[in-house]
Amino acid sequence: AVGFPSTGFNMIGSKALVSDGMVYDLNGKNPSLVVAATDMGSLMSTSATVVSGDQVLRFSTSIASGAEVRLVVAYHATSTAFPVYHDARFGLRVQTGPTAPVTPPATPNTPTPTTANTGCTASTRTGYQCQQVVDAKATLHWNPLANGTVDAILVVSQNSGGWSSVGLPSSGTSMVGAKALVSDGKVYDLNGRSAGAVVESSNNGAFGTTGTGATTSFRMAEVAQVSGEQLLRFSTDVGATGSLNLIVSYHGTSAAFPVNKHDERYGLVVATNGGAQVTTFDDNTEKAKTHGGVMVTVWAYVVPCAILLKRFGTGTLGKVGEYPIAFIMHAVMMLGSAITTTIFFAVALSEFDGNATHGHKDLGIALIVVIWVQVVLGMIAPPKDSSLRFVFKVSHTLLGVGSFGMAIGQMVTGLRNMEDLYTDTIRDNLLIAMLVGLCFFAVVFIVLSVLMVVLADPEAPEEETKAPEEGDMTAQSSENRPYE
């Protein structure tokens, strides 16, 4: 064992890494006061292996600048039952100085299996018993260990230009709430799907809570880049079920984690004494791209065209029977936009697992309500000579402007979702499409508004509204139509 005393070389109050691979709190000299550590203190990584008759305990710890490291070293030669008392105990004072730090080995240590394989696919990697091929680039190798922990290594065939990770989910195979060991050598807390919610883990950026039955912490974690392979070796506790849930993901073209989202993500359920089951996640990228593309088409192109037709085309495009063509086109386009928006919103609720950010879901619900109120209001519009006509026109205009503004806000939050949950490429393409459509609408609206003022004939008399003669149903119908 190697201990890390809190004061002097006192054993009591220290933490100790033992050759069984666990870290203990030494709360007293009585064996009953020696318990599995609930946190890693100043330790940043630990491992314990047996190689050619040597027990090898590797660790890293944080120290203050210019300070020294005090250690307590102990061993017992005739029994592996810790905490049996030691045969010998020594104190070490390690001086630190300006010399360069020792470079860790290029490849993670190779463990010695301690439990026989009982049915898994035999590992092709020296020192491991079991393996599971995740995909063409990634393979997990592991050993079931007798003390309730599992020692494993993830091998991803890619160079340092990309990143890879293995995560310990807090529930199922959900990314949110997991801890992830990444090929940059750090452990992260995945508190959400956005890059801003991914933070370096507490406890010196390496470990979370550990203890008997815990399955969401790394007891040991180390990474290396060797011959075109990223190696992520770790050990963790196995719960009472005897199985381990993992998340494996990687990104091949950029090492900037978590700025660049993963290319692939998989869930693994590992039976530590048997096989493993791989789940390929559908991250809904194509569905999200379709959803965003349709919504941008509707609200940056179709709806603006409908507004332009109603505003500038009612008196210029003629009529079909009693109805202006521009009004018919406006009504059809707006009703179609409302139906399309509702359908794609419902699909998003059912397919995207409620993972929307930046209020996108809540704003979507509000937009659906407003546009259907607007549609219904248009259908029950009062006649031109009704006393309610002015109230209708004001309400219809305000709701129209409001819903269009909400839709623009919704497209913006949707683009931020694309950035957080999917890829920047999709976001950029949709952003360009949205800006082109809205800018075109704004330019045409301004130009046509100016032309209406410039081309207006100030000498033209205002058209008088004649009351229909009694019995003239055609005139009555024409005068009372709300579309004008």
Image (cartoon, rainbow, N blue to C red):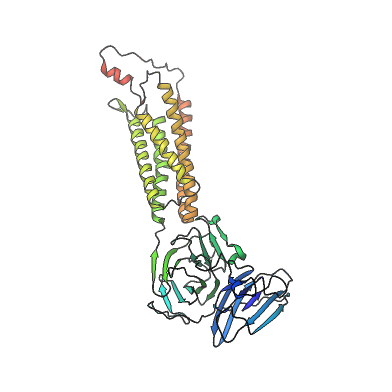
Q: At x 42% / y 29%, what residue is drawn?
A: 396
Tally of numbered tags: 0
For residue 331, above or below residue 412: above
Question: What is the x, y in percent for residue 400?
Answer: 43, 33
Res. 47 visible in picture: yes
Could you say which is closer to the camera, residue 426 or residue 91? 91
Residue at the image position 41 percent from the left and 73 percent from the top:
132
Is 468 placed left or right of 208 in the picture?
A: left
Q: Position of residue 192 (x, y in %)?
A: 51, 55
> What residue is drawn where x is 73% and y is 77%?
95
Q: Where is residue 434 in the image (x, y as percent from the top left)?
A: 46, 45
- The vertical placement of 50 against 148, above or below, is below
Task: Pick the residue in front: 137 or 293.
Answer: 137
Q: In the picture, which quadrant includes the C terminus?
A: top left
Examine the image and state in which quarter residue 477 appears. top left
Q: In this view, does 417 lie above or below 74?
A: above
Q: Residue furthest top?
A: 470
Residue 237: x and y in percent read: 50, 70
Q: Can residue 45 be seen in this view?
A: no
| Figure check: 15 above or below 114 | above
Q: Which of the image's four quarters has the N terminus?
A: bottom right
Please name whichever residue, 22 or 474, is drawn nearer the observer in this view of the structure: 22
Using the image as rendered, state which of residue 452 and residue 82 is in the foreground: 82
